[in-house]
Amino acid sequence: MQYTSESVEALVEQFTKLPTIGKKTARRLANYVLKMPQEEVETIASALRSVKEDVQRCSTCYVVADQDPCPICSSDKRDASTICVVEESSDLIAIEQTNEYRGVYHVLGGVISPLDGVGPDDLRVHELAARIDPSFEDTAADAAPAPETMPDGEAGDDADPSENGQVQEGETAAPVDEVILAVNPNVEGDTTAYYITQLLEPFDVRVTRIARGLPIGGDLEYADEATLSRALEGRGHVD
């Protein structure tokens, strides 16, 4: 016997497909939608359609945006010689909110996780190498030949150093000076950081990683051993 509306049950079923949403939460959301004004429901529906129809990925850094290239990559106020590598677009937003970083980004689309079946070829690590040297061939890292380095900033005939607006007049063929790895401090993040470091080793580029340690306002007595160890390893000079 049907005790409720088929439309409501269909909405509940769709809500359960969202992450962390169980059957009870989905039913509460569906009941809340029933009480919403028609205009608000239509606004939500329009926003959902726009996400699929209008949002695209920047062909340079792969962040989700409404235009290609994205506002960061197309801005002449950003330092294209520094690339901050993040896992997802949400990580880019978190870094931008600090108002401390003025470089550009590269979104990997995840991290290396063998248990989840995610390998290097499932991420945009080779695209990162191609941004540093356009002559890099997108093949497996262990099978790819070492990228050819041109002396005195001269690029090969097939390389266009001005691609993506990274090279201005007077710059060298490899304008990227530093790659900052802003991946999460866990096993998957460490694995991904190590792989990228090895992949970029043949290039004349400095690879760094954001510091890890104690949070501001935290207490030493409540910190775990791994965090304290990282904090000691990353200690800096007191000005």
Image (cartoon, grey):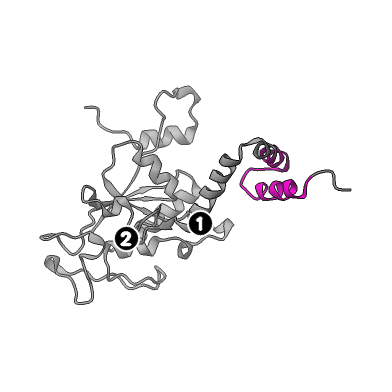
Q: Is residue 21 magenta?
A: yes
Residue 200's label in the rendered image is 2
Q: Is residue 112 magenta?
A: no
Residue 214's spot in the image, x, y percent? 41, 30
Mark 1 Cα shell of 10 Å, populated few (<14), some (14-19), many (≥20): few
Instruction: Considering the whole magenta stretch, tell me its main secondary structure.
Output: helix
In front here: 216 or 56?
Answer: 56
Kindly give the residue lying farthest to the bottom in the view shown: 157
Rendered position, 209 above or below 201: above
Circle nearer the N terminus (2, 1) = 1
The segment highlighted magenta reads: 5-30
Secondary structure of the residue carrying tag 1 is helix
Could you tell me residue 161's position as x and y percent?
21, 66
Q: Residue 27 location in percent, x, y?
A: 71, 40
Q: How many marks?
A: 2
Across and down, in percent, residue 45 comes to 57, 48
Say which amino acid is labelled 1. Lys
Q: Quadrant of the C terminus?
A: top left
